[in-house]
């Protein structure tokens, strides 16, 4: 079979905003032949939003991205990890433990 060589054309977008899980991100993109443009954003752990806007004009121009940040970075105060507990081996017995009594009736 012979398939026609048609240039790709599409658009999509999605977004997630879940305050309970702390998720906030999304993206959208459109393409018509080689010409592609879109953007995506994500909430960073420091509280800022990173947004990337990108374009591809034709087969030779390549991927061109513009990255921006909004908001102010907030960092928690450093707290050193607690020290691990000290290891001490169990004390040694001064004599061996006696054997346990038999759990059966001895033969006569």
Image: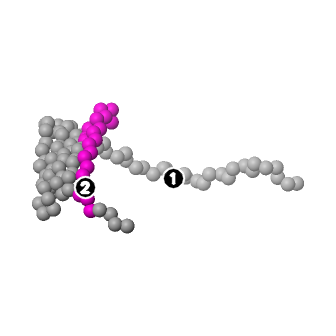
Residue 53 place in picture, x, y as percent: 15, 47
* Image quarter in which the C terminus is found: bottom right
Q: Residue at x 42, y 49 (%)?
A: 88
Residues 71 and 89: in front is 71
Visible residue check, residue 21: yes
Describe residue 47's horizontal placement relative to residue 94 as left or right.
left
Residues 108 and 54: in front is 54
> Between tags 2 and 1, which lies in front?
2
Residue 77's quadrant in the figure? top left
Classify 10 Å Cα crowding around label 1: few (below 14), some (14-19), many (20 and above). few
Residue range of the region highlighted in magenta in the rendering: 5-26
Visible residue check, residue 45: no
In whole angstroms, how far apart are the C-alphas of marks 2 and 1?
Answer: 77 Å
Q: Residue at x 25, y 49 (%)?
A: 10
Residue 89 place in picture, x, y as percent: 45, 51
Residue 92 place in picture, x, y as percent: 51, 52
* Image quarter in which the N terminus is found: bottom left
Q: Say the numbered circle drawn on residue 39.
A: none
Whichever of callouts 2 and 1 sits on the residue coming sooner in the sequence is: 2
Task: Name the residue beneath numbered marker 1.
Answer: 92
Residue 13: say if magenta. Answer: yes
Residue 6 place in picture, x, y as percent: 26, 59
Q: Residue at x 31, y 34 (%)?
A: 18
| Main SS class of the magenta portion in the image | strand
Residues 62 and 101: in front is 62
Q: Say the numbered circle drawn on residue 8.
A: 2
Say what secondary structure mark 1 lies in.
loop
Residue 25: say if magenta. Answer: yes
Residues 19 and 104: in front is 19
Residue 78, compared with residue 91, is above or below; it is above
């Amino acid at each position: 079979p012979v398939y026609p060589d048609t240039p790709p054309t599409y658009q999509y977008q999605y977004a997630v905003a879940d305050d309970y899980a702390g998720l906030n991100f999304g993206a959208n993109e459109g393409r018509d032949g080689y010409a592609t443009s879109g953007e995506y954003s994500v909430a960073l752990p420091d509280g800022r939003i990173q947004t990337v806007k990108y374009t591809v004009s034709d087969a030779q121009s390549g991927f061109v991205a513009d990255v921006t940040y909004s908001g102010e970075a907030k960092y928690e105060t450093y707290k050193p990890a607690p020290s691990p507990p000290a290891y001490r081996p169990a004390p040694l017995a001064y004599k061996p433990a006696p054997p346990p009594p038999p759990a059966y009736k001895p033969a006569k």
